[in-house]
Amino acid sequence: MKKVFFKTFGCRTNIYDTQVMMENLTDFEITENEQNADIIVVNSCTVTNGADTGVRSYINHATKEGKKVIVAGCGAISKGESLFNQKKVFGVMGHSEKSQINTLLKQDTPFYQIGDLTSLDETIVHEYTGKTKAFIKIQEGCNFRCSYCIIPYVRGNARSQDEAKIIEQVQKLALNGYGEFVLTGTNIGSYGKDKGSSLGKLVQRLGAIRGVRRIRLGSIEPVQIDDSFREILSEPWLERHLHVALQHTSERMLELMRRRNNVKRDLELFTELSERGFALGTDFITGHPGESEEIWQEAYATLEKFPLTHLHAFTYSKRDGTPSATMKPEVKGDIAKERLKSIEALIESKNIMFREKNNAIPLNVLVEEFKDDHYIGYDQFFNKVIIQSSRDLLKEWVTIEKYEVKQEGNYAHF
Ligand code: SF4
Protein backbone atom coordinates (compact mmCIF):
# COMPACT_ATOMS: atom_id res chain seq x y z
CA MET A 1 0.00 0.00 0.00
CA LYS A 2 1.39 3.43 -0.92
CA LYS A 3 2.20 5.73 1.97
CA VAL A 4 0.89 9.31 2.13
CA PHE A 5 2.23 12.11 4.30
CA PHE A 6 0.17 15.26 4.90
CA LYS A 7 2.02 18.51 5.35
CA THR A 8 -0.28 21.21 6.72
CA PHE A 9 0.54 24.91 6.51
CA GLY A 10 -1.46 27.78 7.97
CA CYS A 11 -4.53 28.04 10.13
CA ARG A 12 -6.93 25.86 12.11
CA THR A 13 -9.20 25.57 9.10
CA ASN A 14 -6.39 23.83 7.29
CA ILE A 15 -5.90 21.39 10.19
CA TYR A 16 -9.54 20.49 9.77
CA ASP A 17 -9.28 20.23 5.99
CA THR A 18 -6.34 17.84 6.33
CA GLN A 19 -8.48 15.69 8.59
CA VAL A 20 -11.25 15.66 5.98
CA MET A 21 -8.76 14.46 3.37
CA MET A 22 -7.45 11.77 5.73
CA GLU A 23 -10.98 10.48 6.39
CA ASN A 24 -11.50 10.06 2.64
CA LEU A 25 -8.24 8.27 1.97
CA THR A 26 -9.22 4.61 2.09
CA ASP A 27 -6.73 2.81 -0.18
CA PHE A 28 -3.51 4.32 1.16
CA GLU A 29 -1.57 4.19 4.37
CA ILE A 30 -1.20 7.52 6.18
CA THR A 31 2.28 7.97 7.55
CA GLU A 32 3.59 10.49 10.05
CA ASN A 33 7.07 9.92 8.69
CA GLU A 34 7.81 12.26 5.82
CA GLN A 35 10.88 10.31 4.69
CA ASN A 36 8.91 7.08 4.21
CA ALA A 37 6.14 8.64 2.18
CA ASP A 38 5.57 7.89 -1.52
CA ILE A 39 3.16 10.78 -1.87
CA ILE A 40 3.10 14.11 -0.04
CA VAL A 41 -0.11 16.13 0.09
CA VAL A 42 0.73 19.75 0.82
CA ASN A 43 -2.26 21.47 2.37
CA SER A 44 -1.00 24.95 1.62
CA CYS A 45 -1.53 28.49 2.86
CA THR A 46 -1.34 31.63 0.75
CA VAL A 47 -2.19 34.31 3.30
CA THR A 48 0.98 36.36 2.64
CA ASN A 49 3.70 36.42 0.01
CA GLY A 50 5.90 34.86 2.73
CA ALA A 51 3.49 31.94 3.16
CA ASP A 52 3.67 31.32 -0.59
CA THR A 53 7.46 31.25 -0.44
CA GLY A 54 7.39 28.75 2.45
CA VAL A 55 5.05 26.44 0.55
CA ARG A 56 7.05 26.73 -2.66
CA SER A 57 10.35 25.88 -1.00
CA TYR A 58 8.77 22.90 0.79
CA ILE A 59 7.40 21.63 -2.54
CA ASN A 60 10.78 22.06 -4.24
CA HIS A 61 12.48 20.15 -1.47
CA ALA A 62 9.93 17.31 -1.50
CA THR A 63 10.14 17.01 -5.30
CA LYS A 64 13.94 16.82 -5.13
CA GLU A 65 13.57 13.98 -2.61
CA GLY A 66 11.66 12.10 -5.31
CA LYS A 67 8.21 12.40 -3.73
CA LYS A 68 5.03 12.65 -5.72
CA VAL A 69 3.66 16.04 -4.58
CA ILE A 70 0.01 17.07 -4.58
CA VAL A 71 -0.91 20.62 -3.65
CA ALA A 72 -4.22 21.33 -1.92
CA GLY A 73 -5.55 24.22 0.21
CA CYS A 74 -5.56 27.95 -0.46
CA GLY A 75 -2.26 27.86 -2.35
CA ALA A 76 -3.84 25.45 -4.85
CA ILE A 77 -6.26 28.22 -5.80
CA SER A 78 -3.73 31.06 -5.96
CA LYS A 79 -0.62 29.26 -7.21
CA GLY A 80 -1.80 25.80 -8.29
CA GLU A 81 -2.00 26.58 -11.98
CA SER A 82 1.54 27.95 -12.25
CA LEU A 83 2.97 25.14 -10.09
CA PHE A 84 1.21 22.61 -12.29
CA ASN A 85 2.27 24.22 -15.57
CA GLN A 86 5.86 24.35 -14.36
CA LYS A 87 5.57 20.65 -13.45
CA LYS A 88 6.53 21.41 -9.84
CA VAL A 89 3.66 19.26 -8.59
CA PHE A 90 2.02 16.08 -9.82
CA GLY A 91 -1.47 17.16 -8.95
CA VAL A 92 -3.54 20.14 -7.85
CA MET A 93 -6.79 19.74 -5.95
CA GLY A 94 -9.09 22.59 -4.88
CA HIS A 95 -11.00 22.88 -1.58
CA SER A 96 -14.15 21.26 -3.00
CA GLU A 97 -12.25 18.18 -4.19
CA LYS A 98 -11.17 16.86 -0.77
CA SER A 99 -13.69 14.03 -0.78
CA GLN A 100 -12.27 12.87 -4.14
CA ILE A 101 -8.74 12.47 -2.79
CA ASN A 102 -8.71 8.67 -2.86
CA THR A 103 -9.56 8.56 -6.58
CA LEU A 104 -7.23 11.45 -7.41
CA LEU A 105 -4.23 9.91 -5.67
CA LYS A 106 -4.71 6.66 -7.56
CA GLN A 107 -4.31 8.44 -10.89
CA ASP A 108 -1.16 7.67 -12.86
CA THR A 109 -1.42 10.84 -14.90
CA PRO A 110 -0.94 14.38 -13.58
CA PHE A 111 -4.17 16.12 -12.61
CA TYR A 112 -5.43 19.66 -12.13
CA GLN A 113 -8.78 19.53 -10.40
CA ILE A 114 -9.49 22.95 -8.96
CA GLY A 115 -13.25 22.53 -8.32
CA ASP A 116 -15.35 25.47 -7.11
CA LEU A 117 -15.53 27.97 -4.25
CA THR A 118 -19.20 27.51 -3.46
CA SER A 119 -19.49 24.04 -1.95
CA LEU A 120 -19.05 22.78 1.59
CA ASP A 121 -17.53 19.55 2.87
CA GLU A 122 -19.88 16.61 3.17
CA THR A 123 -17.46 14.58 5.26
CA ILE A 124 -18.03 14.16 8.96
CA VAL A 125 -14.79 13.89 10.88
CA HIS A 126 -14.97 11.31 13.67
CA GLU A 127 -11.46 11.25 15.09
CA TYR A 128 -8.61 13.69 15.23
CA THR A 129 -5.24 12.04 14.88
CA GLY A 130 -3.17 12.79 17.97
CA LYS A 131 -5.46 15.57 19.21
CA THR A 132 -7.33 15.84 22.50
CA LYS A 133 -9.84 18.38 21.27
CA ALA A 134 -11.97 18.30 18.17
CA PHE A 135 -12.05 21.03 15.56
CA ILE A 136 -15.41 21.52 13.86
CA LYS A 137 -15.63 23.55 10.72
CA ILE A 138 -18.99 25.32 10.82
CA GLN A 139 -18.67 27.55 7.80
CA GLU A 140 -16.44 28.43 4.91
CA GLY A 141 -15.55 31.71 3.22
CA CYS A 142 -15.91 35.39 4.08
CA ASN A 143 -18.06 38.28 2.81
CA PHE A 144 -15.79 40.94 4.29
CA ARG A 145 -13.23 42.47 2.00
CA CYS A 146 -10.50 43.73 4.32
CA SER A 147 -8.02 45.49 2.06
CA TYR A 148 -4.97 43.38 3.01
CA CYS A 149 -6.63 39.97 2.88
CA ILE A 150 -6.56 37.44 0.05
CA ILE A 151 -8.66 34.85 1.88
CA PRO A 152 -12.10 35.65 0.38
CA TYR A 153 -10.58 35.24 -3.09
CA VAL A 154 -9.25 31.76 -2.34
CA ARG A 155 -12.00 30.48 -0.04
CA GLY A 156 -15.02 32.22 -1.58
CA ASN A 157 -17.99 33.95 0.03
CA ALA A 158 -19.39 32.93 3.41
CA ARG A 159 -21.58 29.83 3.47
CA SER A 160 -22.72 27.95 6.54
CA GLN A 161 -22.63 24.24 7.18
CA ASP A 162 -26.00 22.67 7.79
CA GLU A 163 -26.86 22.87 11.51
CA ALA A 164 -28.09 19.26 11.66
CA LYS A 165 -24.81 18.09 10.17
CA ILE A 166 -22.74 20.00 12.73
CA ILE A 167 -24.85 18.60 15.57
CA GLU A 168 -24.44 15.06 14.22
CA GLN A 169 -20.70 15.58 14.00
CA VAL A 170 -20.40 16.88 17.57
CA GLN A 171 -22.62 14.08 18.88
CA LYS A 172 -20.41 11.44 17.24
CA LEU A 173 -17.18 13.00 18.49
CA ALA A 174 -18.61 13.40 22.00
CA LEU A 175 -19.49 9.69 21.92
CA ASN A 176 -15.90 8.97 20.90
CA GLY A 177 -14.72 10.69 24.07
CA TYR A 178 -14.06 14.24 22.98
CA GLY A 179 -15.13 16.85 25.51
CA GLU A 180 -13.67 20.01 24.05
CA PHE A 181 -14.77 21.43 20.72
CA VAL A 182 -13.17 24.23 18.78
CA LEU A 183 -15.46 25.84 16.21
CA THR A 184 -13.55 27.03 13.20
CA GLY A 185 -14.11 28.48 9.78
CA THR A 186 -12.91 31.41 7.71
CA ASN A 187 -15.23 33.87 9.44
CA ILE A 188 -17.27 31.96 12.02
CA GLY A 189 -19.18 35.00 13.28
CA SER A 190 -21.02 35.06 9.96
CA TYR A 191 -22.45 31.61 10.71
CA GLY A 192 -26.13 31.31 9.88
CA LYS A 193 -26.56 34.64 8.09
CA ASP A 194 -27.37 32.68 4.91
CA LYS A 195 -29.75 30.37 6.77
CA GLY A 196 -31.73 32.67 9.02
CA SER A 197 -29.75 31.53 12.04
CA SER A 198 -26.71 32.80 13.98
CA LEU A 199 -23.57 31.66 15.73
CA GLY A 200 -25.20 32.24 19.11
CA LYS A 201 -28.15 29.96 18.26
CA LEU A 202 -25.87 27.22 16.92
CA VAL A 203 -23.55 27.26 19.92
CA GLN A 204 -26.54 27.16 22.27
CA ARG A 205 -27.62 23.87 20.67
CA LEU A 206 -24.13 22.39 20.68
CA GLY A 207 -23.68 23.19 24.36
CA ALA A 208 -26.75 21.06 25.15
CA ILE A 209 -25.22 17.89 23.64
CA ARG A 210 -24.32 15.26 26.23
CA GLY A 211 -20.57 14.97 26.69
CA VAL A 212 -19.73 18.50 25.52
CA ARG A 213 -17.71 20.05 28.33
CA ARG A 214 -16.18 23.07 26.69
CA ILE A 215 -16.69 24.99 23.47
CA ARG A 216 -13.97 27.24 22.18
CA LEU A 217 -14.65 29.66 19.37
CA GLY A 218 -12.28 30.77 16.66
CA SER A 219 -11.93 34.42 15.81
CA ILE A 220 -15.10 36.55 15.70
CA GLU A 221 -15.52 40.08 14.36
CA PRO A 222 -16.67 42.81 16.79
CA VAL A 223 -19.71 43.63 14.62
CA GLN A 224 -20.84 40.00 14.83
CA ILE A 225 -21.49 40.01 18.57
CA ASP A 226 -25.26 40.28 18.56
CA ASP A 227 -28.05 39.59 21.05
CA SER A 228 -28.14 35.85 20.34
CA PHE A 229 -24.43 35.70 21.06
CA ARG A 230 -24.84 37.66 24.28
CA GLU A 231 -27.36 35.03 25.39
CA ILE A 232 -24.70 32.31 25.54
CA LEU A 233 -22.16 34.33 27.51
CA SER A 234 -23.21 32.90 30.88
CA GLU A 235 -23.30 29.26 29.74
CA PRO A 236 -20.91 27.05 31.75
CA TRP A 237 -19.67 25.17 28.67
CA LEU A 238 -18.52 28.33 26.91
CA GLU A 239 -14.81 28.95 27.30
CA ARG A 240 -14.18 32.08 29.37
CA HIS A 241 -11.99 33.43 26.62
CA LEU A 242 -13.06 35.06 23.40
CA HIS A 243 -10.99 36.05 20.44
CA VAL A 244 -12.40 39.19 18.84
CA ALA A 245 -10.45 40.49 15.87
CA LEU A 246 -9.65 44.20 16.06
CA GLN A 247 -6.70 44.33 13.64
CA HIS A 248 -6.05 47.94 14.73
CA THR A 249 -6.98 50.59 17.28
CA SER A 250 -6.69 53.65 15.02
CA GLU A 251 -9.84 54.83 13.28
CA ARG A 252 -7.84 55.97 10.26
CA MET A 253 -6.10 52.60 9.94
CA LEU A 254 -9.40 50.72 10.23
CA GLU A 255 -10.68 52.81 7.32
CA LEU A 256 -7.61 52.08 5.22
CA MET A 257 -7.86 48.42 6.09
CA ARG A 258 -11.55 48.51 5.08
CA ARG A 259 -12.61 47.02 8.38
CA ARG A 260 -16.17 47.08 9.66
CA ASN A 261 -15.28 47.78 13.28
CA ASN A 262 -14.89 51.12 14.97
CA VAL A 263 -12.55 51.96 17.85
CA LYS A 264 -15.11 53.56 20.18
CA ARG A 265 -17.59 50.67 19.87
CA ASP A 266 -14.76 48.13 20.12
CA LEU A 267 -13.63 49.56 23.44
CA GLU A 268 -17.19 49.50 24.80
CA LEU A 269 -17.57 45.89 23.68
CA PHE A 270 -14.28 44.73 25.18
CA THR A 271 -15.07 46.47 28.45
CA GLU A 272 -18.47 44.78 28.57
CA LEU A 273 -17.00 41.31 27.88
CA SER A 274 -14.20 41.81 30.36
CA GLU A 275 -16.67 42.85 33.06
CA ARG A 276 -18.44 39.55 32.43
CA GLY A 277 -15.22 37.73 33.33
CA PHE A 278 -13.82 36.90 29.90
CA ALA A 279 -10.16 36.80 29.00
CA LEU A 280 -9.94 38.54 25.65
CA GLY A 281 -7.68 37.98 22.70
CA THR A 282 -7.37 39.83 19.45
CA ASP A 283 -5.64 39.97 16.09
CA PHE A 284 -3.52 42.99 15.28
CA ILE A 285 -1.47 44.00 12.25
CA THR A 286 1.40 46.46 12.65
CA GLY A 287 3.04 48.30 9.76
CA HIS A 288 0.13 48.31 7.28
CA PRO A 289 0.74 51.07 4.69
CA GLY A 290 -0.28 54.47 6.06
CA GLU A 291 0.63 53.70 9.68
CA SER A 292 2.61 56.87 10.38
CA GLU A 293 4.45 57.44 13.66
CA GLU A 294 1.70 59.78 14.83
CA ILE A 295 -1.04 57.27 14.01
CA TRP A 296 0.96 54.55 15.71
CA GLN A 297 1.44 56.52 18.95
CA GLU A 298 -2.27 57.23 19.14
CA ALA A 299 -3.16 53.59 18.36
CA TYR A 300 -0.78 52.31 21.04
CA ALA A 301 -2.24 54.65 23.66
CA THR A 302 -5.73 53.43 22.72
CA LEU A 303 -4.67 49.77 22.82
CA GLU A 304 -3.45 50.28 26.38
CA LYS A 305 -7.06 50.97 27.38
CA PHE A 306 -8.31 47.63 26.05
CA PRO A 307 -8.70 44.84 28.65
CA LEU A 308 -6.79 42.34 26.53
CA THR A 309 -5.09 39.13 27.66
CA HIS A 310 -4.04 37.41 24.44
CA LEU A 311 -2.63 38.67 21.20
CA HIS A 312 -2.20 37.17 17.78
CA ALA A 313 -0.26 39.88 16.02
CA PHE A 314 1.70 40.08 12.82
CA THR A 315 3.70 42.64 10.97
CA TYR A 316 1.95 43.55 7.75
CA SER A 317 3.04 41.34 4.92
CA LYS A 318 2.22 42.30 1.39
CA ARG A 319 -0.13 40.04 -0.51
CA ASP A 320 -0.16 40.66 -4.25
CA GLY A 321 -3.64 41.08 -5.67
CA THR A 322 -5.06 42.86 -2.60
CA PRO A 323 -5.86 46.63 -2.44
CA SER A 324 -3.29 47.14 0.37
CA ALA A 325 -0.49 45.82 -1.83
CA THR A 326 -0.42 49.07 -3.80
CA MET A 327 -1.08 51.49 -0.89
CA LYS A 328 1.50 54.08 0.07
CA PRO A 329 3.41 55.11 2.11
CA GLU A 330 4.73 51.73 3.15
CA VAL A 331 6.16 51.18 6.63
CA LYS A 332 9.69 49.85 6.93
CA GLY A 333 9.94 46.25 8.10
CA ASP A 334 12.10 47.00 11.16
CA ILE A 335 9.67 49.69 12.35
CA ALA A 336 6.74 47.29 11.94
CA LYS A 337 8.68 44.68 13.93
CA GLU A 338 9.44 47.13 16.76
CA ARG A 339 5.77 48.07 16.94
CA LEU A 340 4.84 44.41 17.03
CA LYS A 341 7.26 43.74 19.87
CA SER A 342 5.94 46.68 21.87
CA ILE A 343 2.33 45.50 21.71
CA GLU A 344 3.34 41.91 22.43
CA ALA A 345 5.09 43.09 25.60
CA LEU A 346 2.07 45.20 26.53
CA ILE A 347 -0.43 42.35 26.21
CA GLU A 348 1.91 39.89 27.92
CA SER A 349 2.00 42.13 30.99
CA LYS A 350 -1.79 42.51 30.83
CA ASN A 351 -2.08 38.72 30.68
CA ILE A 352 0.01 38.29 33.84
CA MET A 353 -2.06 40.95 35.61
CA PHE A 354 -5.25 39.12 34.61
CA ARG A 355 -3.97 35.80 35.95
CA GLU A 356 -2.77 37.32 39.20
CA LYS A 357 -6.07 39.11 39.71
CA ASN A 358 -8.05 35.90 39.11
CA ASN A 359 -5.73 33.68 41.10
CA ALA A 360 -8.53 32.52 43.42
CA ILE A 361 -10.56 31.03 40.55
CA PRO A 362 -10.03 27.25 40.11
CA LEU A 363 -8.75 26.33 36.67
CA ASN A 364 -10.43 23.69 34.53
CA VAL A 365 -7.71 22.15 32.44
CA LEU A 366 -7.80 19.63 29.62
CA VAL A 367 -4.34 18.05 29.63
CA GLU A 368 -3.08 17.89 26.06
CA GLU A 369 0.54 16.75 26.26
CA PHE A 370 3.36 15.41 28.39
CA LYS A 371 6.69 17.11 27.82
CA ASP A 372 9.89 17.41 29.86
CA ASP A 373 8.30 15.62 32.84
CA HIS A 374 5.35 18.01 32.91
CA TYR A 375 1.75 17.81 31.80
CA ILE A 376 0.57 20.73 29.73
CA GLY A 377 -2.93 21.93 29.03
CA TYR A 378 -5.07 25.04 28.73
CA ASP A 379 -7.53 26.44 31.24
CA GLN A 380 -10.90 28.09 30.64
CA PHE A 381 -9.17 31.43 30.04
CA PHE A 382 -6.96 29.87 27.36
CA ASN A 383 -3.84 30.20 29.48
CA LYS A 384 -1.21 27.53 29.55
CA VAL A 385 -1.07 25.39 32.68
CA ILE A 386 2.03 23.35 33.47
CA ILE A 387 1.39 20.54 35.92
CA GLN A 388 3.66 18.21 37.85
CA SER A 389 2.03 14.96 38.82
CA SER A 390 2.90 11.33 39.56
CA ARG A 391 -0.42 10.30 37.98
CA ASP A 392 -1.00 9.87 34.26
CA LEU A 393 -3.03 12.96 33.39
CA LEU A 394 -2.84 12.80 29.62
CA LYS A 395 -6.20 13.62 28.00
CA GLU A 396 -7.75 14.07 31.47
CA TRP A 397 -9.77 17.03 32.73
CA VAL A 398 -8.36 18.31 35.99
CA THR A 399 -9.39 21.11 38.34
CA ILE A 400 -6.47 23.10 39.68
CA GLU A 401 -7.20 24.98 42.90
CA LYS A 402 -3.74 26.32 43.65
CA TYR A 403 -1.15 27.49 41.21
CA GLU A 404 1.69 29.87 40.81
CA VAL A 405 1.51 32.53 38.12
CA LYS A 406 4.67 32.74 36.06
CA GLN A 407 5.37 34.48 32.81
CA GLU A 408 5.17 31.37 30.62
CA GLY A 409 2.12 29.90 32.33
CA ASN A 410 0.42 28.81 35.54
CA TYR A 411 2.38 26.17 37.48
CA ALA A 412 0.69 23.57 39.64
CA HIS A 413 1.16 20.23 41.43
CA PHE A 414 -1.65 17.74 41.17
S1 SF4 B 1 -12.68 39.18 7.99
FE1 SF4 B 1 -11.19 40.34 6.81
S2 SF4 B 1 -9.24 39.45 7.50
FE2 SF4 B 1 -10.79 37.96 8.05
S3 SF4 B 1 -10.91 36.51 6.30
FE3 SF4 B 1 -12.48 38.10 5.99
S4 SF4 B 1 -11.47 39.61 4.66
FE4 SF4 B 1 -9.84 38.35 5.59
Image (cartoon, helix red, strand yellow):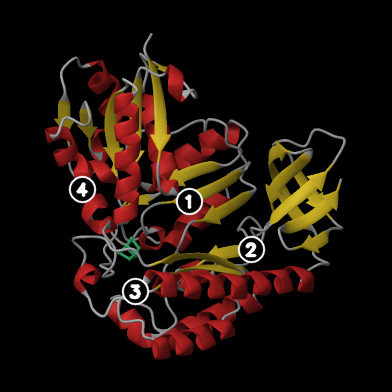
Q: Which residue, given by chain and number where applicable, does mark 2 sit on?
A: 240
Three-letter code for the amino acid on which mark 1 is drawn: Leu
Above or below 337: residue 397: above
Q: Which of marks 1 and 4 is nearer the N terminus?
A: 4
Q: Which residue is drawn at 57% across and 52% down?
A: 215
What x and y, as percent, mark residue 52?
Answer: 29, 48
Identity of the amino acid at label 3? His
Determine the image quadrant of residue 371.
top right
Image depth: mark 3 or mark 4 in front? 3
- Judging by the rendered image, the residue that carries numbered circle 4 is 78
**Which residue is the site of mark 3?**
288
Q: Do the residues labelled 3 and 4 touch (CB within 8 Å)?
A: no
Instruction: State the SS at label 3.
Output: loop
Disc 3 to disc 4, C-alpha distance:
22 Å
Question: In the rendered image, which quarter is residue 264 located in?
Answer: bottom left
Name the spot of residue 171 as percent of width and height, x first: 53, 38
- Per the model, the C-alpha gap separating discs 1 and 3 is 29 Å
**Which of the two marks, 2 or 4, is nearer to us in this view?**
4
Q: In this view, does 285 lie to the left or right of 404?
A: left
Q: Residue at x 77, y 74 (%)?
A: 357
**Which residue in the protein does label 1 denote?**
183
What kind of residue is marked 2? Arg
Q: Position of residue 42 (x, y in %)?
A: 34, 34
CA gap between label 2 and label 4 equals 37 Å
